[in-house]
Image (tube, helix red, strand yellow):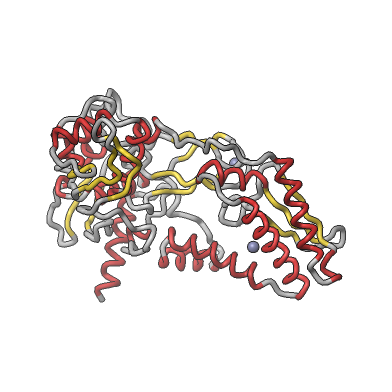
Amino acid sequence: MTLPSGRRVALSADGERPDEPPAGEPRALFEDALDAFESGRVTLATTDGDPLDVAVLALADFHALRAVLTHAGVLHEEPVDITCGNCGAELSASPCRDLEIAPFVDGELDDPDLDRTEPFDTPLEVDPILVGRVRQARTITLAPRTVGDAKRLFSWAISPWDPLDAGVVDALGLRAVGDVTEPERLAKVLTDASDAAKRGFAEAWHAAHYPPRLAAYAPCEACGARATVDAPYDRELTAWLDAAPPEAPARAFVSAEAFADRAMEMADALVARLPEPARAVAVVIEDGTPDVDEGGAPLMGGYLPPSDASHGTVSVYYRTFRAMWNEDGPYDWEDELRETIEHELDHHAAFLRGHDEVDDDERAAIREEEARAVGLRESARRARREAQGSARDFLRSTWPLWALVLAATLYTCATNR
Ligand SMILES: [Zn+2]
Ligand SMILES: [Zn+2]
């Protein structure tokens, strides 16, 4: 298989698949994964068959291996409880189980977004971190780290509220916070940082070591929305992320009533501009759980063409507008609202004309997005299986690792020919 750095390796595993988490208190983060390699239960080799020590791997490569080994059932995965951002239902996710691993097997790790990590040795922007009594830094600079380099980090991260020392700073690869570069001072700056600053640091640090491809969709059974969950979920600084949830904006979003009033005003004006036969369209302001698109994303607006029983209907979803405000901060909601109603009325006009190209494009864009996560070759294989009437999604079920290795070998042979 191919790892995020581009390194190609052969993996094999023997023995049992653990149903239970490892017994006893862990002495270090990722102990189960490191034990699997050290005990020889999992072996790692170059594509020429020479043994490869996991300690020399870049962290991103190690984390991708953790994800794949967990996906294959070699490492235990504890389900993650999350709340659906669309309807509030509780759901349980197993992100490694649901991770799309074909792009690793097929060596398709060149997506400009999904495979991009933040660069090393370049200042990365972060939320302000206090570096003096009042002085704040807004950048951090990180160096690449191998598994061997990060061992001190793994043991410290078991109790992430303990003070850091220069050893942990080195294991993090932290070179600078603003203009502070001295390791002892960096340790103190991070130890004393506010929860919000720790959260910002953790986000930037993870973004340098985990490509966004290491995530899976968790579908909500209640409303059909999909959450994106990190795979593996446990990361070096996860505790720092969870401790300080981002704050909602101080100014609350407009009430459902005021929103609906404004929306109806706009809708009346926009519908009046349509040619006479197209004006028979209903506009509904929905303040319940928003419907989602085919990709599981909550909708701002939707359009249902006319049927024998009813007019065409434009729906506008108050809660999606409110969620955008609470998650990403204040924005010009009236502008977005007008654009949404116009957009849905365009669908209506196109439907009446006989063909809705925009709808075709939107569906194609969702399929394209799916294909990026699944991988091109795997998408083609799935389409083929579906065509053969055997749409058994066998990569998603727990796939024995030997099959994975075999597949990797076969595709390598195929490429070399
Ligand atoms: Zn939901
Ligand atoms: Zn549309």
Q: Is residue 379 above or below residue 19?
A: below
- Give the camera-side residue of 21 and 205: 205
Judge left or right: residue 377 versus residue 358. Answer: left
Q: Is residue 317 above or below residue 365?
A: above
Judge left or right: residue 14 versus residue 224. Answer: left
* Residue 172 horizontal/vertical position (percent): 20, 40
Residue 356 location, quadrant: bottom right
Q: Is residue 206 above or below residue 213?
A: above
Residue drawn at (31%, 54%) of the image: 117
Quadrant of the rendering where the N terminus is positioned: bottom left
Judge left or right: residue 153 versus residue 319. Answer: left
* Residue 409 horizontal/vertical position (percent): 27, 63
* Residue 169 horizontal/vertical position (percent): 18, 37
Res 81 seen here: yes
Question: How many dots with numbers?
Answer: 0
Ligand 1's image quarter is top right
Res 41 seen here: no
Residue drawn at (84%, 60%) of the image: 311
* Residue 66 horizontal/vertical position (percent): 30, 44
Q: Which residue in the rendered view is the most extreme toward the top?
A: 24
Q: Is residue 266 above or below residue 87?
A: below
- Give the camera-side residue of 30 and 330: 330
Residue drawn at (34%, 37%) of the image: 234
Judge left or right: residue 369 versus residue 160. Answer: right
Residue drawn at (56%, 44%) of the image: 325
Quadrant of the rendering where the C terminus is positioned: bottom left
